[in-house]
Image (tube, rainbow, N blue to C red):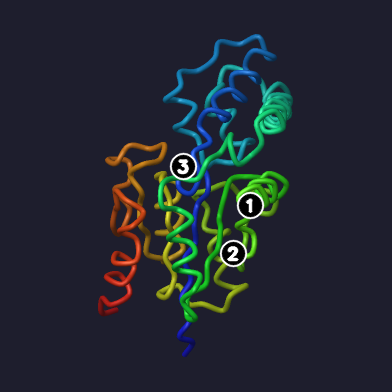
Amino acid sequence: MSDLRLIIFDVDGTLVDSQGDIVAAMTHAFERADSAVPPRDAILGIVGLSLDIAIPRLAPHLDAELHTEMVEWYKEGYIKLRAEAGAALSSPLYPHAREMLETLHAEPETLLGVATGKSRRGLDKLLEAHQLGLLFITQQVSDHHPSKPHPSMIHAALSETGVSADQAVMIGDTSYDMEMAASAGVASIGVSWGYHPREALRAATEIIDDFRDLPVMLSSIWERPL
């Protein structure tokens, strides 16, 4: 049996705070569609879902053809904002995120991965800006999977790394992350600093309020009897 362990991270709302650009890009998409912009909380509530799922949820009154156009308008707005400020500034790392990632990456038996609603292009730009790309051995993006909470991303990460589900943990800030982990038979740790309220993370195995609490919480989960 392998001694390797896998920690899979969500990105937006977990590792980086990109809410400003997300809200601005969604506002741009709705304005292009000549439709009322949803409240900020509603927009942040769909973070983590793929855009082709998120936009119809926010705008069920609009038709499918317009939804498709809005996905492109969202991407257009997001790319423009990122180009103006740079990904490192427009999506800053949360406090202690880098420190914890580097600490965990230094452990010989620990592998790190990403499971995100971002596109391949979007994730690459972000990881390059923060110089984090070499830390993640498996990177699952929306281009190749059904939207969260479908467990496809976690299944792929487990398959790529050869790690069993009982030796993996999903870290995220939304109910979609927690439900995805549960569907994949993987433990989960919710983070309280993201875009879904703490009470929405009820499917989480545990919840933390500070990134520095992550190593202890991981040890607690892995030391529990099966």
> Horizontal placement of 140 versus 211: left or right?
right
Residues packed near mark 3 inside 10 Å, few (<14), some (14 to 19) or many (20 plus): many
How far apart in space, not on screen, are marks 2 and 3 (Cα)? 18 Å
Asked if disc 2 and disc 3 are in contact, CB closer than 8 Å, the reply is no
Q: Earlier in the sequence, mark 1 or mark 3?
A: 3
Of tags 1 and 3, the one toward the viewer is 1
> Horizontal placement of 180 versus 137: left or right?
left
Please provide percent x and percent y for residue 116.
57, 50
Residue nearest the viewer, comparing 183 with 110: 110
Q: Quadrant of residue 206?
A: bottom left
Q: Earlier in the sequence, mark 1 or mark 2?
A: 1
In which quadrant is the C terminus drawn?
bottom left
How far apart in space, not on screen, are marks 1 and 2 (Cα)? 10 Å
Q: Which residue is mark 3?
A: 13
Asked if disc 1 and disc 2 are in contact, CB closer than 8 Å, the reply is yes
Q: Secondary structure at mark 2?
A: loop
Q: Which residue is mark 2?
A: 136
Q: Earlier in the sequence, mark 2 or mark 3?
A: 3
How far apart in space, not on screen, are marks 1 and 3 (Cα)? 15 Å
What amino acid type should be assigned to the residue bearing mark 1?
Answer: Leu
Residues packed near mark 1 inside 10 Å, few (<14), some (14 to 19) or many (20 plus): some
Q: Quadrant of residue 80?
A: top right
Residue nearest the viewer, comparing 145 with 4: 4
Q: Which residue is mark 1?
A: 127
Image position of 19 with respect to 35: above or below: below
> Horizontal placement of 50 versus 9: left or right?
right
Image position of 47 with respect to 163: above or below: above
Image position of 26 with respect to 109: above or below: above
Tell me which residue sits at (49%, 62%) in the image.
8
Please provide percent x and percent y for residue 134.
64, 64
Tell me which residue sits at (65%, 20%) in the image.
29
What amino acid type should be assigned to the residue bearing mark 2?
Answer: Phe
